[in-house]
Structures are given as structure tokens and as C-alpha cells.
Image: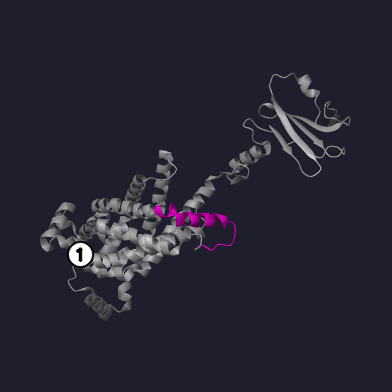
């Protein structure tokens, strides 16, 4: 290694050699640490120049450090660059990294841009990631709860009235609060579901990207990660969804709240009754997650690679470290994040809605008359035709459009606010 720095009026040269471990100790002892004056023939001057010599021996090859400084004959003005390890890194940096690893702390090496994280930092980042998804679900579901209620009226109760007549009926019989009936349970279901769903998708996508070695996630990897995320969230969160469906079904009010419905189902039908409709749920959530996340990421990638997107990305990089609010830090910007989220949600809902209808009917069945998924689907078609599989699709789409857009917007926003990496 040889480094030359030339500040005004000074010449400062640092260098050194790695010595073989079999170098005789007598030779090493003859080199003193500190400043030494030596003459260099051929430099065009008889003045003696200041030299710093040092031998460093610690856990690796011996390194002979040499520093030369000339500043108008005033003597030595610099110090040796430091002890180098086997890979050429400064010994001070190696020691800091080793201490950081032992203590589980985050260690940053500015020259290399390397960051070593302990287990505690990773767990905290995961928690913040999950909270971002949970908050997104809480906000979006509360906003669209009235539309969710209308959709369930068509699916669960087989409502035949048109949309406006149904709205009038609910308002007249239950008041304004009737439109938010079951919303608390819905939040209990969707908050953990969305938290797991968003986190699982980001995790699976990153792992697939790492396995493939590509610079950017492919469309196929996006769809696979989305499907896997949907399945993961469905398996973990379907019991709460079953309880909520039971509560809004006919006779559900008499069972009490969440605890009452839970006890009733476990006592009368067994614990596995909480997983009614798991198969159609998995069948629907796999393509739903694939379409939802896949479409959003495809739209996002297309924009970021467009001239407008590249200009925005460049502008954001130039403003890093400055005063940028969370909205300005959104990669797509607020409006485009909302629009792309709505498009992705609508595509996913339309593609998988029949599975949703079958799953809701399965969750309402009692043990004595329980049918499998295929038989339930055929029964729905026999009673109402193919269109029965799309009962409530219009209010469902009206619900999904704002729900998906708000959900993705709040999720991206919360990741910035919570500084999720």
C-alpha cells in the first residue's frame, strides 16, 4: 500500500510491506517505532528527511509501516496509516467490528459502507415491519367498514334488495353504527393478517432475489412470493375470520361477542371448526396474493424504469439528508401509490371472488349438514346459477378499491415513518 497526500506546502508519503513470519527477530528489533532521520541520495538535496518506522505484529502477518514527510525542512508532520490486517483493512476498523459483533451492536464502517447488525436490531426491524402492516389494515378497514358490511349482507344473508334499498334498510333499523357492525372483530382479523401478509411478501421476495442472484426481482418471483405470503397469512389468521363471519350470520348476535362465539364453536363443533373453509381460503389467497403484489410491483417497476420515474429517483437521491417529509419520500409519490394499490386490489378481487363466496358459505355451515368445498360450490350454483358465485361483487369492488389503495399507501408511509429497512 502506498498513499500520497499533498496538502499545501507538504509532501506526506505512507507505505509499508508485509513481512514473512520467519523474518529473524534480530532484524525486527533493529527497527524502532518513532521518528528517524535518514538521507535519501538522489533527491537533489543534502537535507535529511524525517521518517517514521514501525513494526506491528498482531494476529496476522507482520507489517512494516513507513511514513515520510517533507515540509520545508521542518521535520516530520504525519503518522503511520495504521496497522493493516490480512485483508488490507485498518486494524482499528477490524477491532471495532469484532467488538460490535460480540456486543450485538450495529457497527458502521464508513469507508467500506458495511453495516454489521446484531440480533436485537433485526428483531426491532421485524417488529416495526409488522406494525406498518397492522396500522395499514386498521386504517383501511375502518374507512371501508360500511362497504364490507354491505358485501357480507349479500354473501352471508343472501340479500336480494338492490344496493340503495339495503343501505336505507340498515340505516333505518340499526342506525349509523350498523354500518360498522363487526368492525372491531374485522380489525382483529385483518390487522395481524395484513401485518403477516406484507412482511411475508417482502421477506419471500428478498429471499428469492438472493437465491436467483438477479439484480431485480422477476415477475415470476413476484407472483410466487405473493402466493406464498397469502398462504402464510391465511393459515395463521383464518380462525378470527371464521369467528367474525359467524357473528354477522343469522343468529350470531345471540352468541355474544368474540369470546362467546369462540366458546360456542369449540364446545359444539370442536377446535378445528375455527378452520372451516381453510382449503378454499388457501386456494383463493394464493392467486389473490400473487395478483395483488405482483400487479402492484409490476406497475411500480415500470414507473421507476420510465424517464419520469428515473428523474424522481435521482431527485430523491440528491435531496437525501435534507428536510424531506414522509410523503415526499414515497418512491411513487402519494397519488401514484394510491392508484396502483387500487388497481392491484381490484385485479386480485375479481380474479378470486368465487373462492371468497364458497369460503363464506363453508364457514356458516354446522357440523350436521357440513359439505366439502366442491359440494358447497355446486350447491351455490344450483340455487342461484353461476352469477351466485359473484354475489356482492359490485359492493366488494367498491370496498376493495379504496381499501387496497389506502392499505398500500399507509403501509409504505408507515415504513418510512418507522424507518423500516
Q: Position of residue 187 (x, y in %)?
A: 37, 64
Residue extending farthest to the left is 382
- Specify start and end residues of the magenta stretch as a single range: 302-326
Let me know if residue 288 appears in the view. yes
> Does 29 sit above or below residue 7?
above
Q: Main secondary structure of the magenta part?
A: helix
Tally of marks = 1
**Quadrant of the snapshot with the N terminus:** top right
Q: Please name the residue shown 23% across and 53% down the image.
A: 280
Q: Please name the residue shown 76% across and 41% down the image.
A: 6
> Disc 1 designates what residue?
391
Left or right side of 18 for 271: left
Q: Position of residue 232 (x, y in %)?
A: 34, 50
Of residues 358 and 120, the one nearer the viewer is 358
The stretch drawn in magenta includes residue 68: no
Q: Please name the residue shown 11% across and 62% down the image.
A: 383
Would you identify the image quadrant in which residue 80 lies? top right
Let me know if residue 247 appears in the view. no
Amino acid at each position: 500500500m502506498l498513499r500520497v497526500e499533498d496538502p499545501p506546502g507538504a509532501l506526506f508519503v505512507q507505505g509499508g510491506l508485509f513481512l514473512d513470519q520467519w523474518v529473524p527477530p534480530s532484524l525486527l528489533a533493529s527497527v524502532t517505532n518513532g521518528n528517524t532521520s535518514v538521507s535519501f541520495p538522489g533527491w537533489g538535496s543534502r537535507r535529511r528527511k524525517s521518517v517514521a518506522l514501525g513494526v506491528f505484529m498482531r494476529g496476522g502477518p507482520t507489517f512494516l509501516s513507513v511514513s515520510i514527510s517533507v515540509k520545508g525542512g521542518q521535520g516530520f508532520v504525519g503518522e503511520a496509516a495504521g496497522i493493516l490486517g490480512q485483508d488490507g483493512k485498518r486494524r482499528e476498523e477490524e477491532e471495532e467490528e469484532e467488538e460490535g459483533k460480540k456486543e450485538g451492536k450495529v457497527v458502521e464502517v464508513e469507508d467500506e459502507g458495511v453495516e454489521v447488525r446484531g440480533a436485537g436490531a433485526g428483531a426491532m426491524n421485524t417488529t416495526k415491519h409488522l406494525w406498518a402492516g397492522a396500522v395499514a389494515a386498521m386504517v383501511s378497514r375502518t374507512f371501508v367498514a360500511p362497504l364490507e358490511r354491505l358485501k357480507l349482507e349479500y354473501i352471508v344473508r343472501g340479500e336480494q334488495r338492490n344496493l340503495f334499498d339495503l343501505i336505507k334498510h340498515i340505516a333505518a333499523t340499526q342506525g349509523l353504527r350498523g354500518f360498522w357492525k363487526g368492525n372491531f372483530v374485522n380489525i382483529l382479523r385483518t390487522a395481524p393478517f395484513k401485518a403477516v401478509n406484507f412482511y411475508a411478501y417482502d421477506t419471500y421476495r428478498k429471499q428469492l432475489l438472493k437465491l436467483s442472484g438477479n439484480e431485480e426481482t422477476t415477475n415470476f418471483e413476484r407472483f410466487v412470493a405473493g402466493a406464498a405470503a397469502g398462504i402464510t397469512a391465511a393459515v395463521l389468521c383464518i380462525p378470527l375470520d371464521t369467528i367474525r363471519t359467524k357473528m354477522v350470520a343469522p343468529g350470531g348476535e345471540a352468541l355474544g361477542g368474540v369470546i362467546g362465539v369462540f366458546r360456542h364453536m369449540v364446545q359444539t363443533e370442536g377446535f378445528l371448526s375455527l378452520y372451516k373453509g381453510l382449503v378454499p381460503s388457501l386456494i383463493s389467497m394464493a392467486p389473490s396474493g400473487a395478483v395483488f403484489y405482483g400487479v402492484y410491483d409490476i406497475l411500480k417497476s415500470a414507473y421507476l424504469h420510465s424517464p419520469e420515474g428515473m428523474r424522481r429517483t435521482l431527485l430523491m437521491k440528491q435531496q437525501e439528508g435534507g428536510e424531506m417529509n414522509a410523503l415526499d419520500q414515497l418512491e411513487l409519490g402519494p397519488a401514484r401509490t394510491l392508484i396502483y394499490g387500487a388497481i392491484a386490489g381490484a385485479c386480485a378481487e375479481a380474479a378470486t371472488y368465487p373462492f371468497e363466496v364458497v369460503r363464506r358459505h363453508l364457514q356458516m355451515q354446522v357440523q350436521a349438514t357440513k359439505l366439502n368445498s366442491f359440494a358447497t360450490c355446486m350447491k351455490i350454483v344450483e340455487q342461484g346459477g353461476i352469477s351466485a358465485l359473484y354475489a356482492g361483487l359490485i359492493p366488494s369492488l367498491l370496498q376493495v378499491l379504496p381499501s387496497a389503495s389506502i392499505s398500500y399507501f399507509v403501509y409504505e408511509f408507515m415504513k418510512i415513518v418507522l424507518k423500516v429497512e
